[in-house]
Amino acid sequence: MRFCVLTFGCRANQADSCDVEQQLRANGGAPSAAEAADVVIVNTCTVTAAADQAARTAIRRIARLNPGARIVVTGCYATRNPSEVALLPGVSALVPNSAKAAILEFERAGTSWSDGARSVNSPVRQAAGSPVAFPMSPGDRGRTAYPLKVQTGCDEQCAYCIVPSTRGASASRPALEVVGDVRRAAGAGYKELWVSGVHLGSYGRDLSPATSLVELLHALDAAAAGSDVTFRLSSLEPMDCGDELVECLAASRRFLPHVHLPLQHASDRMLEAMRRPYTRDRFDAAIDLLRRRLPDAALGTDLIAGFPGETPRDFDEQADHLRSSALTHVHVFPYSDRPGTAASRMAGKVTATEIRRRATALRAIADDLNRAFVGRQVGRERDALTLHDGTVALTDNYIKVAIPRGRPRNERVRVRIESVNPVRGKIVGGKQ
C-alpha cells in the first residue's frame, strides 16, 4: 500500500501525523506523493476559517488528480464538522481526534467512526501512544526534528477557541512512555526533538500520581544522557512559565533557548473578553524572566487581530506593546468566527477589511522585531542543526541561516551569523 499523510496546523497535529505514518510503515505501507498514493490521510486543522478552506482545497485537489485514492480525513476539522467534510469528493472515511490512534483500522474498513461508540470529546490516551517499532529516521517526509508528543487536549475555555471540543480534556502520556520514545528517536538518528502538546504546561496534572512538566523535563534530560539529543519546547501558556520551569531550561544545554508564549492580546480588557487566565503583566513578567536567564533566546508569541469588541484604542495598545517588547517571533492571526465558541456570539464584530488592516500592521511590527533580533546575532557563533539539503541550518535560538553547500541534513554545526537580509552564515566548526 502506498500512502501519503498531509498535515495542517499545530505541532500536536504534526506529532499525530508522525504516529500515523509509523503505524502505516510498520504495517507494510510505503510513503508516496498524494498523486500516486492508494491512501491519502488528511490531518486537518480548524483553528480559523482559512484552515478549513485549506483542507477543503487539498481534498478536492487529491480527488481530482488521484480519483482512485481512498481519502481518509481526520483532525480537528473532521471532528468539528464531519457532515461538511463528508460531502467533499473522494472522502471514504472520517476519523475524529478521539479515534486517531486507530486510524489504520478505519482506513482498512473504509468507514467512519460512530460517535455513539465513544464521545469525540473523551480524553483518549492511546491517541498519544507509541508504536512498537520505530520505522522512521531523519529526513523521512522532509522532517529533520522529531515531534515528541507528550500531551493532548485542553481544559481551558478561551472564548475564541474550538480546540477543547475537538481535542477533549487534557490527557498526558506517562513519563516512561515518553522516555521510551526519546530513546527510540535517538537510536534512529534524531538529534532534535520538539516537546509538543495542546496545553503543554498542564502536563501531568491528570496522571496518577500527578506530576508536572518540570519533572518530565528532568526525566527527558536524564534519558538523553550519553547522546547529542536536544529538546525544543512547543507553545507554553504564560501562566505555566514560572521560575522553576525557566530555571530548568536555563540549567541544561539540552533545552534549546527558544520559548513560545501565546499572549493573544496586549489589552487586559481584551484578555478578559477572550477568557484568557492571565494579565498582560503576568505575560511581561514571564518574558522578562526568560530574557534575564536566557539572554539570546528566541521568544515568540501569538496575537489575534480584530477580536470582537476590539476598539481602535485596544488595537493601538496592542501595537504599542508589541513595538516595545522583547519578542523575536510573532504569529498574527486575523480573528475568525468558530461556530460553537463564545466569541462567535459576541457583539461588536470588527469588519473583515479592518481585521486585515490591523493584522498587516502587527505583522510589519513583528518583522521589525525579528530583523532586530537577527541583527543582534550578527558576528556571533551559535550551535545549529542542518536542515533540508544541508544548505540551511537552524540555530539553537531558532534562526534559519543559509550556509554553503557541502553538509548533509541533520548534522550538528557551529555557525557564525554574517548578514541579516538575507540571513547568511559561515560554518566555523562541527559538533560542540
Image (spheres, helix red, strand yellow):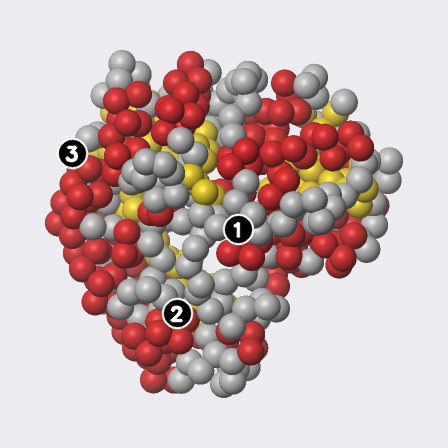
Q: Where is residue 258 in the image (x, y as percent from the top left)?
A: 29, 43
Find numbered disc 1 in the image and state the secondary structure of the residue it sits on. Answer: loop
User: Residue 105 sits in which quadrant?
Assistant: top right
Find numbered disc 3 in the image and state the secondary structure of the residue it sits on. Answer: helix
- Spatial CA distance of label 1 from label 2 is 18 Å
Q: Name the residue under label 1.
A: 168
Q: What residue type is labelled 3?
A: Ala
Residue 252 in the figure: left or right of residue 275: left
Quarter occupied by the C terminus: top left
Nearer the observer, disc 1 or disc 2? Answer: 1
Quarter occupied by the N terminus: top right
Residue drawn at (40%, 31%), measured in percent from left and top?
A: 174
In front here: 174 or 389? 174
- Spatial CA distance of label 2 from label 3 is 33 Å
Residue 166 to residue 160: above or below = above
Pointer 1 or 2: first along the chain: 1
Residue 204 to residue 231: above or below = below
Q: Position of residue 103 (x, y in %)?
A: 67, 34
Q: Mark 2 points at which residue?
A: 275
Residue drawn at (42%, 25%), measured in percent from left and top?
A: 177
Nearer the observer, disc 2 or disc 3? Answer: 2
Q: Which amino acid does label 1 sit on?
A: Gly
Q: Where is residue 79 in the image (x, y as percent from the top left)?
A: 65, 52
Residue 251, disc: 3
Q: Position of residue 62 (x, y in %)?
A: 77, 43
In front here: 277 or 33? 277
Pointer 3 or 1: first along the chain: 1
